[in-house]
Image (tube, rainbow, N blue to C red):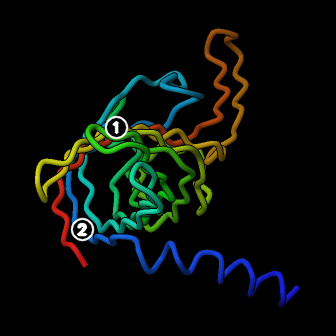
Amino acid sequence: MKKTLLIGLLSFLPILTFSQNKIGILAGVNGSTLSDGILESFGIHSNSFSLHLGAVYELDFSEKIAFRPKLIYSQQGDREDFYDNIKYQTSYINIPLNFKFFNKPYILAGPQIGFLLDTEKREFDFGDLKSLDYGLNLGIGIDIKDFFVELNFYQGFNELIAVKYEQTNPFRDIDIKATNTVVQLSFGYNFDL
């Protein structure tokens, strides 16, 4: 096992020594909701806007492929008031583990892990959210000298809330299986290392 790990690390050494590395900062706006699948609301329709900021690291593997992980503080959830009593405002530390393909423009794809920092709820709530979120991140971007602009779409796979309320009126039953759905527009600046 140790021998296999050593051989694996040594095989990546030429890539690491000859690749160009960048580190950058980014900030932007989110359009987010707690949804039942891709852009399907769980009965309370909302798209709310919030902010995100973070850092990005880029490790080039070749001319057209790079590993581009990020560390992002992101305000998410349904941040608007619904019927004056339902609101889930959440804050996450997200770690998108993206791969970057091509150069101008470029495509981003990879998994994302999120850690819940804070939740604010109003009087009617569906329970506590799970503290770990995971899903798929897809995006496009363009570099303009040392600046970049990215549009990312994230769909969570982890059900953060799973609740069923049965009421006497059959049209009022609520079956909630909520995941995070986030669209992000980011503006950033890269520093060459």
Q: Quadrant of residue 30?
A: top left
Residue at 49% from the left image edge and 44% from the top image edge: 109
Where residue 180 appears, x then y in whole percent? 51, 42
Residue 38 to residue 180: above or below: above
> What kind of residue is marked 1?
Ile
Q: Secondary structure at mark 2?
A: strand
Element marked by disc 1:
strand
Circle 2 crowding by C-alpha within 10 Å: few under 14, some 14–19, many from 20: some
Does 53 sit left or right of 100 as displayed? left
* Nearer the observer, 6 or 54: 6
Residue furthest to the right:
1
Q: Which residue is mark 2?
A: 24
Q: Position of residue 131 (x, y in %)?
A: 59, 63
Corner quadrant of residue 169: top right
**Residue type (three-letter) at the residue carrying disc 2:** Gly
- Split into 4 quadrants, where in the image is the N terminus? bottom right
Which residue is under mark 1? 140
Image quarter where the C terminus lies is bottom left
